[in-house]
Amino acid sequence: MQDLTDLYQSVILDHNRRPRNYKVLPAANRVGSGNNPMCGDQITVYVQLDGDRLTDVSFQGSGCAISQASASLMTLNLKGKTVAEAEAIYANLHRMVTTGKVDEDNLSDLAALAGVHQFPARIKCATLSWHAALNAAKGDEKPVTTEKPGD
Amino acid sequence: MQDLTDLYQSVILDHNRRPRNYKVLPAANRVGSGNNPMCGDQITVYVQLDGDRLTDVSFQGSGCAISQASASLMTLNLKGKTVAEAEAIYANLHRMVTTGKVDEDNLSDLAALAGVHQFPARIKCATLSWHAALNAAKGDEKPVTTEKPGD
Amino acid sequence: MNNAWKNLRADFPILNQKVNGKPLVYLDNAATSQKPQCVIDALTHYYRKDNANVHRGIHALSLRATTGYESARERAAKYLNATEPGEIVFTAGTTDSINLVANAWGDENLKKSDVILLTEMEHHSNLVPWQLLARRTGAKLRYLPIVAGDTGLLDLAQLAKVLTPEVKVFAFTHVSNTLGVINPAAELCTAAKKVGALTVIDAAQSAGHMPLDVRALGCDFLAVSGHKMCGPTGVGLLYGRKVLLDAMPPYRGGGSMISNVEYFESKWAPAPAKFEAGTPNIADVIAFARAMDYLNDLGREAIAQHDEKLAALAYAGLKAEVPGIRILGPAHHRSGVVSFDLKGVHAHDVVTMADQEGIALRGGHHCNQPLMKKLGLSSTSRASFYLYNTETEIDRLVKALQKISKFFAS
Amino acid sequence: MNNAWKNLRADFPILNQKVNGKPLVYLDNAATSQKPQCVIDALTHYYRKDNANVHRGIHALSLRATTGYESARERAAKYLNATEPGEIVFTAGTTDSINLVANAWGDENLKKSDVILLTEMEHHSNLVPWQLLARRTGAKLRYLPIVAGDTGLLDLAQLAKVLTPEVKVFAFTHVSNTLGVINPAAELCTAAKKVGALTVIDAAQSAGHMPLDVRALGCDFLAVSGHKMCGPTGVGLLYGRKVLLDAMPPYRGGGSMISNVEYFESKWAPAPAKFEAGTPNIADVIAFARAMDYLNDLGREAIAQHDEKLAALAYAGLKAEVPGIRILGPAHHRSGVVSFDLKGVHAHDVVTMADQEGIALRGGHHCNQPLMKKLGLSSTSRASFYLYNTETEIDRLVKALQKISKFFAS
Ligand SMILES: Cc1ncc(COP(=O)(O)O)c(C=O)c1O
Ligand SMILES: Cc1ncc(COP(=O)(O)O)c(C=O)c1O
């Protein structure tokens, strides 16, 4: 199971076991949700938006280790960022999980998700929470679903 | 076109060109109709039934040489027969057009249709008018169609 | 087991490959089965020798195609012990077959005060078409529950309470694709008949796995998918009692289902043509019949025994060797479907890890969302067996799950 | 014509056979086309290497199957120049595609005072579904007539009269399967748009025969059959503009078309999944895309020119050499479909005789009963050409018809 340690790095296993910011955010003024109808993953993301800044982010839901860890890492990485910054971080993440290329200039704990690119079926798992969060931040609270073309 | 002269014997060509009893029968008390929805053949058979005897039979319609000739020959062969006799004649005809076996004891001009058995797609053409006539004689005036399983 | 079972794995070329460096162990048979070479050959033979449109043609190829197509109908009728070939409608699969009944029979026969009875373990394919029908007609949906706990057996004690005279149709699955439960189909049909309800059996998981006799079952309709029983994708069938098919309006409009068309009205062909609008899936229907012949050659009772043996082995092995596993479905008398939940490990993680070992499992809700919710789960992992699976493969499954459970526990 | 045309007949194994002792001349292409070996290989490769159910699986085979299936959707979108793959719904064929629109779009959007506009040359598949819809909704059917005589051209002078603001949908065939007429599809779509009517193009006879660009045509929906364009039986597609597909309710209920299912209600997946209930026809969809690649390699403009050349030859040859022949359709600018009536000889007799010469023709109403009646015919014989037909074959056709006409005249 060599490749699996790429996918399930200890950071991932840790965030899966002890997801950070796994809670309802009482001060949230935006809520996003996402689901992967094909496997039953469901996620709700709470965003406290102040102007165009995400002052706090949390989530709840169920899903595989990748989706749980990605959501947990997301809450840490988006907190305090502007919507534009959040989108840039997601763009980097998306490139990384689809190509495996890690942006050496912007290294962060998100690099733990780089192994996902070897498992194309799991890319949806890594991006679901991010879609929900960004859509919510941008004012689109329609549930996201992995069935939409593109991730 | 050798086999074709088996199928299109001169009797057939003759009955096709000059169908006998091709008319409405004013004295008819039974009318049957049949169609072959897949090719557009249509036939109406008029029967004058007296007790259980077919005292006269005629037909009208359009179809291929086989169906026209078979209908024409039918009017000649059924005239004057009882329903039971008509059924027996049809049973012979059916055997002949499906197996090619001619009943040597009951030879008639219907033997011209024996070649049909080499052309399975044309069996329906040869039997359509007979179904319509026998059903009508037996009191079932529902249109017959070649789409019913069995011919 | 007869001679056809010898060297049976060699009949399935796809099994002879490695996945992630390990010999493939294909345990996703409830989703779709693999195809023996004879079925693949039936397709290539058709396209290389006989291909033509059916019914409307009288040239040589068209006759061959038509003969092949109608012979398939005859063999399908025999396979299910239908009264006549005219009781077999070829469709695109189980989902299409059930929609056919819900539309053609349902819209014509249901009204507001009627009840549609289903069970709590239905696949979305035998659930959503009835929800749509209920919405169109105002009829009510009702469910026969499963018993509490994880066996997933139908709660037959409740049957008399839910199967009341308002029930006009009772649609249920023969074998659950998630629980492995084999329902007492004949008994349910008898009970339905007593209140005058028609029965629709979803046989997607049983038709290729055991002897099946529609007259012995006493059902009115029965839906089957070819791809789950060694046949090609895109083809299936609906069995319907002839008097019911004859009385039903058509499903889709188009060529071949008509007897006469005018610009402003049309008349329909008799069943089964009435329900087969357009050019049918000729090649796949012919190959589907070849698959039925193949299963008959192996012996369908032998297949059922083989499935049951593997399921029992897997059930016992997983239970004994894998800590924290929760196995759904009954311990005995089950089909070759074993779903389980590994404590603290999501099904997708299980499937990805098993795939690294060359083992094909399925993870998710298995088109059984409401049942999952009822069982307090969002997804399960599922291993499902078929005639080409072996005891050695069950060993590999059990070992892989030990490893996975260890990996996540560490 | 590029290199792909060299040795092209060798791509089609079925052509290399004798029928009734003569080399097969397959001229029944409007009914169904033959398949190149690469399409047959796509099927066998899939079943021998990659077969698994799509979408719901994450093991290796399932990923391969899903990738193949979705790649087919992308290629189909490119083939038709759709805006995005999500505008392609895979169906069982043209008939299924048209029924999808008539049901999912039609029931939701039509009311009693609305009009459905068709043309007098529609195939039963683009006629009966609208009759059924009219019956369900109370909307009225109306027809754009053809001009008097045998050219079969649409009477465009009548268009403004029939295409009134009450028309909510205008469904017409791109190419007539009986007359060989090529309709001015873009012009008809522009006219429809002006009165706010949606357009549905039946492209069964055009999709494999000429360049096709849904955006240039400006249509709202377009229906295609795989089997008429070198693809397998049992598969086709519906192109639909994305906003329309998104707004439509589902067609059939079942697995894969849902986003959430509860016992008493469900939510739908976005298009195109919403319209693809149940296990799709995976293998045939993949092989269908291979057929599109094959046609692209040959060049679709070149195919159109080849068809037209053969049709012109056949038209001229039959007219000059066969006494008593009546040829339907226009003399020029026509597709490779030539229907004719031989005075005093029924189409079935023509076809049976041609078959003795190894020539596959079709005889009958070609699923065009009302048109036949309008032309004063009950059936015609039809020769229809495709990329593998040759000028020599047209010679043999003309010679055979001379012989047949002589036989019956004698
Ligand atoms: C013009 C036209 N429309 C529709 C169809 C129906 O196509 P299918 O039978 O593949 O559904 C055909 C072919 O039969 C056709 O020629
Ligand atoms: C019990 C059951 N019913 C219905 C179906 C639907 O079959 P299909 O997807 O072939 O239409 C399946 C398989 O997915 C099934 O397992």
Image (cartoon, coloured by chain):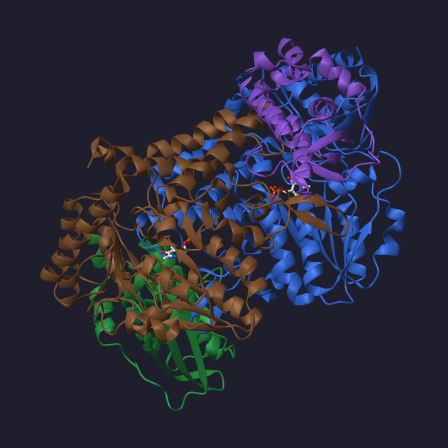
Chain colours: A green, B purple, C brown, D blue
Residue C252 position in % (x across, y down): 60, 52
Q: Quadrant of residue C172?
A: bottom left
Quarter occupied by the N terminus of chain C: top left
Tag count: 0
**Front residue of D303 and C364:** C364
With respect to residue D40, does D316 lie above or below?
above
Q: Quadrant of the C terminus of chain C?
A: bottom left
**How far from the left and from the top, in percent, is residue A40?**
36, 67
Residue at image x 31%, y 37%?
C296
Q: Is residue C331 left or right of residue B91?
A: left
Q: Looking at this rendering, what residue extends furthest in the front direction?
A: B51
Q: Is residue A131 visible?
A: yes
Q: Is residue C144 left or right of residue B17?
A: left
Q: Is residue D261 left or right of residue D309?
A: left
Residue at 65%, 15% in the rendered image: B7
Please tell me which residue lies in front, B114 or C268: B114
| Figure check: D273 above or below D119 | below
Ligand 2 image position (quadrant): bottom left
Q: Is residue D398 left or right of residue C333?
A: right
Up the image or down, D188 lies above or below D270; here it is above
- Percent of width and height locating residue D51: 36, 43
Q: Residue furthest left?
A: C320
The image shows residue C199 at horizontal and vertical percentages of 43, 60
Q: Is residue C83 above or below residue B117?
A: below
